[in-house]
Image (spheres, helix red, strand yellow):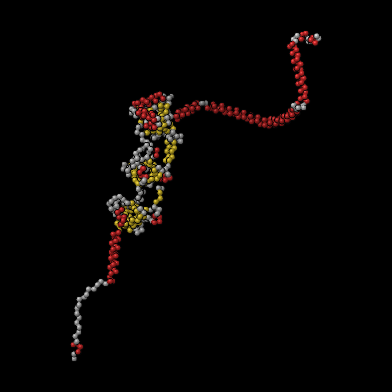
């Protein structure tokens, strides 16, 4: 039987097209995060500077992610990686540079590792003791960008400093080194930054740097000289010791200044070339425009005479020695010492009275014949001669002195290869040696043996005399001295007795009531009366000269 439920119609499913739904809010956050990340990445890429590589010989003190690159103490980059080069000979450092410093990465930029350094020229990099080493940077002047560089072994001496470089020409380096100080009027104003041999290998080029603003004092007429350590000079002028400072004493140094006679104050351009002198005296020496060369031939040793020794005239320096050598005379089989000197006529003008300078200058600039005739006259009439003299007993250095020797033998000016040869006289030392030699010869001729024998006899006689005198002195001391002492005591007693006697005589003769005084007064009175009677008698005798014959006449006047 059929089921009644089979006749019920069931609902049919209808296919409906799905509706488009909106984006769920759940996806907003990831999308925003992705957008922010993309923006940050783009911003980072746009803000990042270039990546560069620096090749060093070693990576001492450099650490990836820690070591910075600094320019004027401002961080402009950081080391990212450190690895060997392909040949393992060097170290390649990769660093990220700040966007703002990207324009500094040019082909002549310089990099070096800054570390603590202690040397005789100074101490640097002490701040790295706490912060660690860093890579120093020096900007270049090129406009060509570059990303790979070779690091310097040492920091440049003038990194970031204003000033100018100059080159000095020298025969040798001496005690100079990179970093040696440079002085101007004893004020440190720069330093030596480098040196190298010239291409021909015959001299040294020394690069110096003068800091601003002192570089303006380097003019075309400036002269440089060494002040390395102690400048000890032994010459005919004596001993001269100079030093610039303690630093120059330890590591050497240079100094510069303009001589007072140089009036060219034009500032020297960068990289100008100057001659380096050995000392201040040589640098400050004036270059004489007028020079005359003469030759002197001495028949004595030239030991102690050196090139540069002064030539004086009556004590005033008028030139210097420029050459010392020998002249060979084959016809005489002789070799004669030769000294070439230069005479600076202009130096005579500086010590001449202003009223005579024009006349002297005209004479000095005249022809050679006139000058030679004047010299010959001085040689003939006044005995002008050249002589070697000792300038310093301490150093034994000699110099050439022109002076007058009226008793010198006659001589004249001779010419050899166009150069005038002036006459000379032996030095005082040679004369002294000759006199000493003559004295020694006379001493050698003395009969020294006979003199010694007679002297020995005289000494023996003197010894006997002294022995006798000693015995006599002893006898006097033992025999005569006691007797003499007794006699002196007796004499002393006699003198005392005499003194007492004199006192008693004084009392008896010279006292006011002494008997002798009374008797003396009576005697004087009697003498006075006798004198009076004698005067009366003489008066009478004068009136009556006949009385001695006839007798005294009677007085008749009374009889009448």
Q: Which residue is nearer to you in this view: 72 or 446?
A: 72
Name the one closer to the observer, 322 or 280.
280
Tell me if residue 510 can be seen: yes
Asked if residue 334 shows in the view, the reply is no
Query: In the picture provided, is 303 more to the left or to the right than 51?
Result: right
Residue 172 point in image, percent of width and height: 36, 42
Between 490 and 266, the one lying in front of the other is 266
The quarter holding residue 103 reads bottom left
Examine the rendered structure and indicate whether residue 160 appears above or below residue 330.
Answer: below
User: Percent from the top left, x then y, of residue 313?
Assistant: 41, 30
Q: Quadrant of the N terminus?
A: bottom left
Q: Residue at x 38, y 56 (%)?
A: 132
Position of residue 547 measured from the top left corner of the image (x, y, whole percent):
76, 9
Residue furthest front as drawn: 560
Total numbered labels placed on residues in the image: 0
Image quarter of the C terminus: top right
| The image quarter in which residue 25 lies | bottom left
Q: Give the farthest residue toward the right.
A: 559
- Tell me what residue is drawn at x 34 percent, y 45 percent: 165
Snapshot quadrant of residue 223: top left
Looking at the picture, how far across and down is residue 273, in whole percent? Answer: 33, 42
**Where 78 falls versus 518 (above or below)?**
below
């Amino acid at each position: 039987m059929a089921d009644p439920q089979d006749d019920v119609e069931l609902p049919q499913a209808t296919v409906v097209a799905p509706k488009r739904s909106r984006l769920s809010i759940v996806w907003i956050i990831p999308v925003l995060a992705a957008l922010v990340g993309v923006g940050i990445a783009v911003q980072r890429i746009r803000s990042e500077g270039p990546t560069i590589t620096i090749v060093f010989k070693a990576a001492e003190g450099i650490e990836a992610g820690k070591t910075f690159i600094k320019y004027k103490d401002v961080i402009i980059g950081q080391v990212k990686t450190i690895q060997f080069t392909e040949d393992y000979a060097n170290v390649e450092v990769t660093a990220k540079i700040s966007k703002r410093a990207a324009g500094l990465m040019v082909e002549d930029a310089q990099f070096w590792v800054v570390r603590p350094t202690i040397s005789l020229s100074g101490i640097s990099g002490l701040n790295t003791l706490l912060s660690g080493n860093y890579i120093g940077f020096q900007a270049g002047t090129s406009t060509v960008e570059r990303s790979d560089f070779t690091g310097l072994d040492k920091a440049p001496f003038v990194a970031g400093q204003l000033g100018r470089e100059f080159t000095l020409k020298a025969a040798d380096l001496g005690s100079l080194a990179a970093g040696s100080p440079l002085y101007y009027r004893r004020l440190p104003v720069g330093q030596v930054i480098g040196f190298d041999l010239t291409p021909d290998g015959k001299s040294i080029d020394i690069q110096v740097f003068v800091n601003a603003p002192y570089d303006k004092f380097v003019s075309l007429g400036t002269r440089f000289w060494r002040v390395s350590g102690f400048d000890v000079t032994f010459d005919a002028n004596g001993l001269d010791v100079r030093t610039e400072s303690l630093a120059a004493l330890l590591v050497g140094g240079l100094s510069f200044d303009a001589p007072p006679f140089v009036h060219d104050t034009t500032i020297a351009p960068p990289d100008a070339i100057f001659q380096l002198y050995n000392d201040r005296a040589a640098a400050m020496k004036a270059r004489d425009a007028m020079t005359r060369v003469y030759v002197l031939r001495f028949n004595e040793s030239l030991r102690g005479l050196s090139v540069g020794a002064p030539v004086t005239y009556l004590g005033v320096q008028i030139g210097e020695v420029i050459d010392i050598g020998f002249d060979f005379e084959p016809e005489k089989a002789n070799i004669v010492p030769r000294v070439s000197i230069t005479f600076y006529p202009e130096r005579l003008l500086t010590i001449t009275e202003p009223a005579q300078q024009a006349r002297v200058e005209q004479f000095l600039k005249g022809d050679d014949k006139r000058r030679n005739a004047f010299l010959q006259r001085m040689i003939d009439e006044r005995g002008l001669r050249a002589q070697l003299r000792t300038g310093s007993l301490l150093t034994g250095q000699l110099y050439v002195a022109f002076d007058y020797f009226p008793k010198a033998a006659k001589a004249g000016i001779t010419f050899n290869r166009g150069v005038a040869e002036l006459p000379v006289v032996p030095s005082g030392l040679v004369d002294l040696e000759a006199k000493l030699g003559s004295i020694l010869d006379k001493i050698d001729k003395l009969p020294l043996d006979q003199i010694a024998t007679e002297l020995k006899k005289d000494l023996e006689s003197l010894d006997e005399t002294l022995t006798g005198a000693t015995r006599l002195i002893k006898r006097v001391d033992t025999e005569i001295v006691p007797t003499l002492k007794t006699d002196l005591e007796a004499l002393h007693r006699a003198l005392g007795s005499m003194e007492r006697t004199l006192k008693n005589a004084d009392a008896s003769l010279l006292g006011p009531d002494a008997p002798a005084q009374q008797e003396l007064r009576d005697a004087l009175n009697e003498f006075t009366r006798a004198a009076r009677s004698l005067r009366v008698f003489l008066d009478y005798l004068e009136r009556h000269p006949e009385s001695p014959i006839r007798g005294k006449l009677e007085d008749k006047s009374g009889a009448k």
